[in-house]
Amino acid sequence: MDRRLGDALAIAANAQAIPLIARYAILLIARYAILLIARYAALLIARYAALLIARYAILLIARYAALVCVSAEGAALTGIAVCCSICFNERRIAS
């Protein structure tokens, strides 16, 4: 009788341990999955933000260079001589 009781207790202990191990395994897998998803999401957000910043920076630089090219004084002050010399040479040829 004692042996059967011991076997029953061992089976019950193993049956309780299996869900506990499964629970920890599921939590561990979920944790790594969440970290992996968060890492890729952060990379995508950073890449998109970098593209937006680069696009607006290029537009601002181009707009500023176009404004500077309008006047010879502005070209001499800022040192954007190549762009301005092209702009002014085209104006001379056109006039």
Image (cartoon, helix red, strand yellow):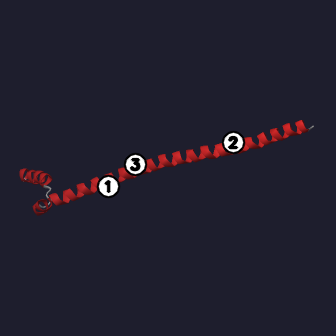
Disc 3 crowd rating (10 Å Cα; few below 14, some 14-19, many 20+) is few
Check if mark 3's residue and mark 2's residue have beta carbons within 8 Å.
no
Question: Is 21 or 5 nearer to us in this picture?
Answer: 5
Disc 2 crowd rating (10 Å Cα; few below 14, some 14-19, many 20+) is few
Label 3 SS: helix
Q: Viewed as shown, does residue 18 lie left or right of 34?
A: right
Q: Earlier in the sequence, mark 2 or mark 1?
A: 2
Q: Which residue is mark 3?
A: 47
Q: Earlier in the sequence, mark 1 or mark 3?
A: 3
Q: What's the amino acid at mark 2?
A: Ala
Q: Between marks 3 and 2, how big is the CA–CA gap?
A: 37 Å
Name the image quarter holding residue 5: top right
Q: Residue at x 81, y 39 (%)?
A: 10
Q: Viewed as shown, does residue 2 lie left or right of 71?
A: right
Disc 1 crowd rating (10 Å Cα; few below 14, some 14-19, many 20+) is few
Of circles 1 and 3, the one toward us is 3
Q: Which residue is mark 1?
A: 56
Label 2 SS: helix
